[in-house]
Amino acid sequence: MPRQVDHDQRRRQIAEAVWRLATRGGLEDVTLRQVAAEAKVSARLLQYYFGTRDQLLLGALEILNDDAEQQARERLAMLGDTPGMHAIVRGVLLELLPLDEDRRNRHLVYAAYFVRFLTDPTLAKVAHDAPLALENLVAGLIAQGQETGQAPRNIDAAAEAAFLVAGAEGMQSSVLLRQRSAEEAIAMIDHQLARVFTTTNGE
């Protein structure tokens, strides 16, 4: 067990080096040697834990996503034992915004990956399904709200979910660039959620 812990810690150490380089100058020209130097490990050790450059970028992204999911679960757990669907969907959407230092840094890393997603087929395949999975999650939550009388039955849960996720993701860059404050972004999400949910039961 300790060996597995050491293995995971070393992978995280290297992944965090990738994240730092991503936020400082993007990922277009990052080399294995640069990552090794940033992580203070040998290039051979880096290759042992991740393999090729593409495998390194994918592995660092996977660890980042795992962190994001864990933090999201913890924040959603703080909503209480029986939160309404409105509160849960709101919590999911707020995870898409850079509302604190951790989420801001994470979204800066995602922004660096975005260019790679556009030009690298391997990374593009990984990125392709992520928004759809999130839309399906939100659509399912809205549908549960419809079944329990928290949302009107005549709305299209899938269409509303697609709009809400796209809207939240679209505001990431404007908040990162400080064109829009976090409070303004939250208010816009709340305005849209007020259309979807007819009650705040459980909040």
Image (tube, grey):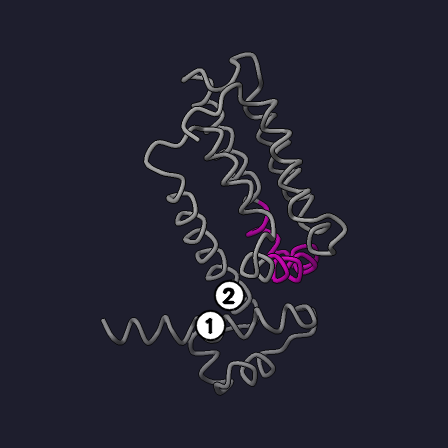
Residue at image mark 1: 50
Residue depicted at x 51% and y 85%? 43
Quadrant in the picture for residue 31: bottom right
Marker disc for residue 138: none
> What secondary structure characterizes most of the magenta part?
helix
Q: Amino acid at mark 2?
A: Ala
Q: Is residue 113 magenta?
A: yes
Of residues 184 and 30, which is closer to you in this image? 184
Question: Are dots 2 and 1 in contact, CB under 8 Å?
Answer: yes
- Residue positioned 30% across, 72% down in the render: 5
Vertical side of 133 occupied by 82: above or below: above
Identify the residue at the far left of this view: 1
Q: Residue at x 57, y 61 (%)?
A: 101
Depth check: 99 or 109 in front? 99
Q: Quadrant of residue 194?
A: top right
Q: Looking at the image, which residue is at 45% across and 28% down?
A: 85
Q: Amino acid at mark 1?
A: Phe
Say whether disc 2 or disc 1 marks the residue closer to the N-terminus. 1
Q: Secondary structure at mark 1?
A: helix
Magenta stretch bounds? 107-128
Q: Which residue is mark 2?
A: 60
Q: Is residue 10 above or below residue 85?
A: below
Residue 37 part of the magenta-drawn span: no
Near-viewer residue (187 or 29) = 187
Position in image of residue 69 (x %, y %): 44, 51
Q: CA distance from mark 2 to mark 1?
A: 9 Å
Disc count in the image?
A: 2
x and y, in percent, of residue 6 in the image: 32, 76
Front residue (pair 45, 109): 109
